Amino acid sequence: MDGGLEAVYDRIRQEVAARADRLWDTALALHRDPEPAYEEHRAAGLLTSELAREGFRVERGTAGLPTAFTAAAGTGEGPRVALLMEYDALPGLGHACGHNLIAAAGLGAALALKAALGGPRGSLLAVGTPAEERGGGKVTLVEAGVFDDVDAALMVHPGVHSWSWAPLTGSAQVRVGFHGRAAHPTGDPTEGIDALGALIQLFNTLGVLHRRLPSGSHVQGIITDGGRATNIVPEYAEGLFGLRGATTAALEDLAGELERCAEGVAAATGTKVTVERVGGRYEHFRDNPVLSGRFAGHLARAGIELTEPEAGVYLGSSDIGNVSTRVPAIHPFIAIMDAADGSDHTPLFAAAAASPRGRRVLLAAAEALACTAAEVLLRPEVSARAWACLRERAAAGR
């Protein structure tokens, strides 16, 4: 190992240790005061204040999102590394996805690396990304060009597994509306065209479709409008469907299947149908093994070993996918509780996000993120290999 880099790693560990209590206080402050998607005003204020305090150039309201931000350090010439932070909470459950730890780990990595390198060559960015749980702040930031010219986008997620990368599917929300004709179900039954019956038939059709979907593809729907009264044949009925696919291409195939099924049901029932996307599409996560391998090696120094994900297991979807298909990115999971004890999005996981194990994971993750970012900034071959890996995976559709 390069002796100069080893000295940098030592300084990073010292800087994280010096800030350990402050980082944990930040994580606990976020945990005590959970804010849902697009409403994380106090969280964004706390994080940007910490970054500005240590000399980062802070821009608030990035891409027109009031709770997004970017904070920059460095010369601006050379490699660009982005450390990503999430801080939205779940309504009713608080930080049951551990975003308070994600934010504090990204903050700790940014502060420690800037201090360790002084004025780093290139650019070190700390990016506040709101609304991962609903809406997808990163989708907006990608479209606004925030990640243009970034050579590595790094973040870590607490979980119930310790995996070197995240098997995250693509996802989209689709609204399907059937238009029929109202009538009295007894007095004028032949004149009615039952929109709700058509929607229910779509659910039945999708149940059959489900049996032949490829691994990672899934569709789940709810009825959002089923009529107004039992003595009126519903003239309109609407469902909202969540689609997932192991790859973004598989997601689009499933969206096409849903639309064809809806059109077939409409033709069979005499209704008219509208199919429209709701919100932004989350693309599947494309891991960069060059960077995730480096992160895993640094994390092992703190006594946490990462493994490959279990085959065939998917952990949901995230807007980090939209970043990862454009620039080299990592999104490892680190367990703050064991899978046998439960899962995320539960009260138990929320408690784990403020536990002693959560603190250990936070500090270890901050060190490993900072060390990985240092490699990208200081070793040009790491960035070159990461970009080559991304292009190879993109060409293979992975």
Image: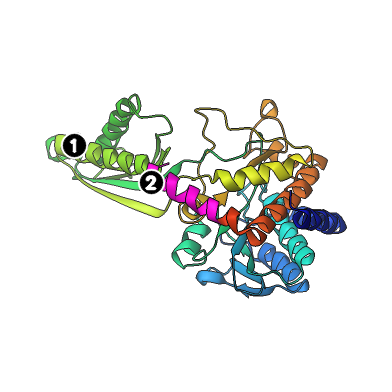
| Label 1, residues with CA under 10 Å away: few <14, some 14-19, many ≥20 | some
Q: Which residue is mark 2?
A: 395
Q: Is residue 173 above or below residue 129?
A: above
Q: Secondary structure at mark 2?
A: helix
Q: Is residue 139 above or below residue 186?
A: below
Q: Amino acid at mark 2?
A: Ala
Residue 82 in the image, given as x and y percentages of width and height = 61, 61
Q: Residue at x 67, y 36 (%)?
A: 306
Q: Quadrant of residue 384?
A: bottom right
Mark 1 or mark 2: name the one nearer the start of the chain. 1
| Label 2, residues with CA under 10 Å away: few <14, some 14-19, many ≥20 | few
Q: Which residue is mark 1?
A: 264
In front of the other: 243 or 299: 299
Residue 85 in the image, given as x and y percentages of width and height = 64, 57
What segment is highlighted magenta in the picture? 384-398
Q: Residue at x 75, y 58 (%)?
A: 108
Colour mode? rainbow
Residue 396 in the image, given as x and y percentages of width and height = 39, 42
Is 396 one of the magenta-colored residues? yes
Relative horizontal placement of residue 33, taking residue 199 as reference (left or right): right
Q: Amino acid at mark 1?
A: Gly
Q: Is residue 84 above or below residue 336?
A: below
Relative horizontal placement of residue 208, taking residue 186 as reference (left or right): right
